[in-house]
Image (tube, coloured by chain):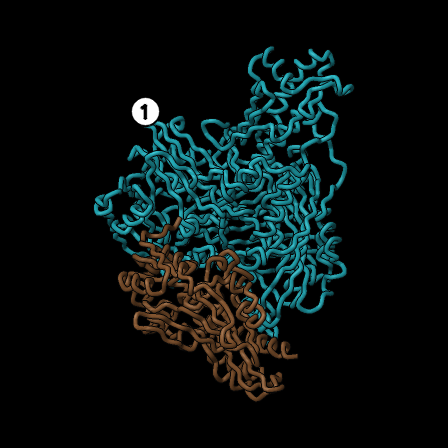
Chain colours: A cyan, B brown
Amino acid sequence: MASGKKAAVTQPAAVGRSDGQLRVVGKAIRKVDATAKVTGATRFADDLFLPRMLYAKLLRSPHPHARITGIETSKAQALPGVKAVLTGRDLPIPFGILPVSQDEHALAIDKVRFVGDPVAGIAAASEEIATAALDLIDVRYESLRPITDAEDAITHPEPRIHDYGDGGNLHKLVNLEFGDVAEGFAEADLVREDLLFFEGSTHLPMEQHAAVADWSPLPDGKLTLWSSTQTPHYVHRALAKVLELAPAKIRVVATPNGGGFGGKSDPFSHEIVVAKLAMLTGRPVKITLTREEVFYCHRGRHPTLMWVKTGVKRDGAITAMHFKSLLDGGGYGSYGVASTYYTGALQTVTYDVPRYKFQGARAFTNKPPCGPKRGHGTPQPRFALEVHLDKIAEQLEMDPAELRLKHLVPPNSLTANWLKIGSMGLGECIRRVIDGSGWRQKFRKLPPGQGIGLACSSYITGAGLPIYWNPLPHSGVQLKCDRGGGVTVFCGSTEIGQGSDSILAVLVAEILGLDPFDVAVVTGDTDLTPVDLGSYSSRVTLMTGNACIQAAERARDAIASHAARQLEVPVARVAFADRRVFDLEDPTHGLAFADAVQLAEAAQGTIGTVGSYTPAPSPGRYRGAGVGPSPAYSYSACVALVDVDPASGIVRVPRVWIAHDVGRSINATTVMGQIEGSVYMGLGEALMEEMAYRGNRNVVHKIPSLLEYKSPTTLEMCDVVTYVVQDPDPNGPFGAKECGQGPLLPVPPAVANAVYDAVGVRVDEVPITPEKVFKALRRKEKGEPARYGPATFPEIAWPEPTRVPTPWEGGDGRAVEGGGRRATEAARRP
Amino acid sequence: MLRLPSFTYLQPNTLALALRMKADAGPEGTYVAGGTDLYPNMKRRQQEPRTVISLMTIPELAGCGIRDGGCAVGPCVTLTDLCAHPAIRQHYDTVAHAAELVSTPLLRNMGTLGGNLCLDTRCNYYDQTYEWRKAIDFCMKKDGHICWVAPSSPRCWAVSSSDVAPVMVALGAEFRLVGPNGERIVPAARLYANDGINYLTKQPDEILAEVRLPPADGWDAVYHKLRRRGSFDFPVLGVAAWLKWDGRRVAAARVVLGGVASRPQEVVEAGAALTGTDLSDEAIGAATEAAYRPAKPLDNTDFDLSWRKQMTRVYVKAALEELRARRR
């Protein structure tokens, strides 16, 4: 594997008081939690056992869409060992991750909306008793016609799944226009339209969701919930709302997540149910979901149908783009409104798109709810756009790499939809993968059956706005220096395997001149740690990183001022490294870090500091401008090599070259791991992963098991050649940007483009299964269009567009008409 | 997490004791070897025995050795040990190859030859949890009355998913079954019935006590497996092809398909199309067509069924071409 740096790195102010060398940042460092993970010492939520603990199970709906006409629980309650039974009436207050979609109940009250929707909860002395009791609950249902997919939702506005939204079974409609798109198409030398489909997929974390609740009735009641959640702060809020408890009476502890990928970012039914059961029984209650139930929690990739039309000049310069998406949202809102906007938000962030129109629709359907999966709403349009560009390049007889390189979005610029681009390393990324893969010798030149494809992408480094509107910091850090020389850092962020605990340790170690293993990290505990919004949207390295740097710098300044007096040097010359505090000009003249802490503590009391981070406001001021802004955008370019067997249509991917602009690598090991992990997940979506349902069989999930939901094994995983491009962004800690989601995005389109290079057929949807390639090859043999993919985009009654002049049209970021206000506005309020 | 239900677990050390325990337990008793098939099924309540009788503690079921020119293999030999056994590797490489294609290394460490040969038939509608099956109102193989794969069908279409069974049928192996009324020897093909529920002719109280492989000379065999991934997955199509050579001519041939019926399905016409030929392209083409026509995959496994049918051609052809290449 190779790695490299783009240019001389600007020295951030954060390392001002040292010799200018980075001692920890950028090195390959063992994760602070790695030893515990590999030795089995880590205690996940299911590893927790409390005295007198009960076990909970959820009764789930066997119907995709039905009214509940009665629930009889007395038989279950009478079963020896059953301690409590809950139904929807016990938890009547709705919740949901977004303020505009408070549409979930911990247990269904009047209606169920998918097979697997929780209906009743049981606490019993053992899991076996709780399971047996499920069959003793008698629920009477009155079936309603199920809505099987997004197109079915459009043609069947009735029966409505929810009584809110943008009409019928459409949850959300978006219509945004930046600049005069018609004028842009008129200027084009070539206008091309394409239809593509991206199938839904799920996160598949190794750890099933689990939660333990404990209720201490004395002195005046305190609930503690341990849960495998990526967002303890939002769970805290949901518990307070639904249980009607003061937030101070609730403590949420995020246990280490055995993988999250976005699937543990919502507050969930099972978390609320165990909390209520603990309060009712006065005993701790645990629930561990089965793998099947994890499929029902879902919140994964939205199946998305996409139509894209782009006008280009002869040299490939884009004159205008019009993009439409139709998302199959499943039974509840979840993050879906944000997901819908995300399918249209980042098209402008990679290449120069001077005029842009986006129309997005999300449908309610009777399936487990979709939400944020790694890349949240952006891998689908990225797939569409990059395959579309590949076709445009072919029509223009241009090399697809050249086309992209010629029209990159400029760094430090504003896009048509008012996103602020900072550092932009995509050009370097493309050059790395082109050179590394031998692109020029291979593209359209490989023997039949072998092919090579290119795709690029960009992703946010944290969402610019919080999920519920507030002016508060997105991340807070407290730091405490111990007399012995150790430092403890406290932050609400959550370790989901991505290495966020290590980021805190590395940054504190860098600034205070310590070893990362001198730093104790306390995270994800609403009683102990300041709020961090959670491990989602690739926000943690940048946001907690900046908060952490601020706290560490404040501690460093406090210690340095007292050390300077002791060392009799100006404070500006005091440096921190190797667990010492010393004179920069005479490094032998200094004292141990622990001694320096003691000096400072003697002089001014306990050395504790805080830091926090709030992203700068975004220039976009139109309704919908909240989705897309980010402090910094990461960039990726990917080349995939494929082998396609023309007899079977089976596609194998022996190798992927990927370059990722991470701004600055904080921990070289975890950066590499995140990039490779993203490639793995992208490969699964490209080739096989599929949330398949049986529309004609009660809309059951076809395959809710680890065996039959196909995800690549080690044998299917390709070789990965990774290039880490470092184009530091002024907004990132030491210049760092994200790397945990972005590198997934270019993998599916790179594979699709490579399949075309190999056998000359277009599979315009993922997963690219052998059946689809085989059918496309058959069509090609018969002289029909050599393509497999969707045929039409349904008619949708879009609202009037929100028209926003672009920066180069003299706009100020506001809409001039539309504004997106609609009659349904009132219905959106909780 | 899915939990096993409570059950009584017995560990007899002789066949006679195992038979007695089964007689005592009655229909609610079952035998288990490695458990890699039974225990997940019990977690999903596909099988609900109250008494589980392990065969792993019976020494005579665990050996493997050359006998009477052939090879006698104990059914409780794990698949890992079977693959590694020198006599199997040297003389029955296709058996080792098929065993090596079963599931994953971890499951082969537990799973046994006998377990794979008696593997419960599988189906997308059956290999699901109790709650899932309840949501579609169960199927006739367990708790219900309908076959969801073919709703008008009077029979169950669950599919034979063993990798080793088609090879045993193709080789003409024999099985020794021991029951309360003594023992009997059955040809491999006769162990299986084309019914997703009653897929074995072995009586529930009989124990598969020995697998007898024919003497390893004068014939050759191959096994090709189609599945989504290179590990873990059951076959959606298995092709076992066996040939007896007479000089450069094919004296006899058998083509057996796995994953297309409730038993390993021999395609007699395919074998006939090869007999007497020198395995020319034409002969392979004729055998391939013969195998393709009757193959009727149903919507009971992974992959689209029409594609699976198309793949019968591709995989039978590849298997026969490999046999030809091995001859040269």
Of A52 and A337, the residue lying toward us: A52
Of A519 and A676, the residue lying toward us: A519
Q: Quadrant of residue A505?
A: top right
Circle 1 Cα neighbour tier, 10 Å, few/some/many (<14 / 14–19 / ≥20): few
Element type at mark 1: loop
Q: Quadrant of residue B30?
A: bottom left
Q: Is residue A155 visible?
A: no
Left-right relation of A23 to A67: right
State the image coordinates of residue A35 (x, y, percent, origin top left). 56, 38
Q: Is residue A121 visible?
A: yes
Of A76 and A621, the residue lying toward us: A76
State which quarter of the image contains the C terminus of chain B: bottom right
* Residue type beneath disc 1: Leu
- The residue depicted at 76 percent of the width and 61 percent of the height is A441
Of A781 and A654, the residue lying toward us: A654
State the image coordinates of residue B145 (x, y, percent, origin top left). 29, 67
Q: What is the chain identity of the residue bearing mark 1?
A: A
* Vertical order, B122 against A166 (above or below): below
Left-right relation of A804 to A17: left
- Name the residue beneath numbered marker 1: A218
State the image coordinates of residue B241 (x, y, percent, origin top left). 53, 77
In the rendered image, the residue lying farthest to the right is A585
- The residue depicted at 50 percent of the width and 46 percent of the height is A372
Total count of labels: 1
